[in-house]
Image (cartoon, helix red, strand yellow):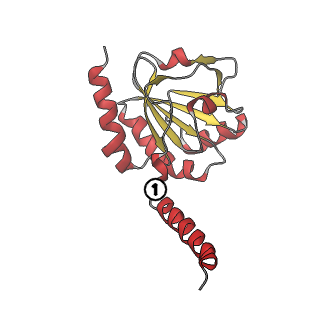
Amino acid sequence: MKPAALIPLAIFLVLGGLFAMGLTKDPSAIKTQMIDRPVPDFILTDLRDETVTYTQADLRGQVSLVNVFGSWCTPCAVEHPTIVDIGQQDVVRIVGVNWRDERAAGQAWLNRLGNPYDIVLFDDLSLLAIGLGVTGAPESFIVDASGTVRYKHTGMVTPQIWRDTLLPIINDLKKSAP
């Protein structure tokens, strides 16, 4: 067999190996450049009252769980009961970011499923989402009392992820807050 005949086989094996390596990666472990950086500047309206505006300064003063969701997002609806449970525990301020949605659809979604959020930002144009490096919904960020992003979770927050990952980080940040 001629060596030139082995080139397509070698290419196939290399590509197959790269594909197989990709299958072993955890999609929720997507890195973000925002860790240990302040929440980017933004001015967004409240989902329910477009005359009320919020900025990054509103994410200072206490530890927050920032949860990106949309009424169009099926995994967000699956995750939502966990976010409601977290809200009932009253251990962290929860900030919702209604992303790439229609205002009325986001309002109706929360009316139907319950509103666990202390603040709900309306980000229809992805202004905050782009700054945070959101790649899809749901995504959640832990922001410390100084307004610095300390952790990003890509995908649904499950009771186990809350208990084993997010809550310990939040408790550590609350202990170290001034």
Q: Quadrant of residue 64?
A: top left
Residue at the bottom extreme, as displayed = 1
Name the quadrant of the N terminus: bottom right
How far from the left and from the top, in percent, is residue 36?
43, 26
For residue 167, side relative to residue 44 (left or right): left
Q: Residue at x 62, y 20 (%)?
A: 42
Q: Residues within 10 Å of mark 1 (few under 14, many from 20)?
A: few
How far from the left and from the top, in percent, is residue 93?
43, 27
For residue 39, side relative to residue 144 (left or right): right
Q: Quadrant of residue 7?
A: bottom right
Q: Residue at x 57, y 65 (%)?
A: 15
Q: Amino acid at mark 1?
A: Lys
Which of the pair 86/176 is nearer the observer?
A: 176
Q: Is residue 44 above or below residue 129?
A: above
How far from the left and from the top, in percent, is residue 168?
29, 36
Which residue position holds label 1?
Answer: 25
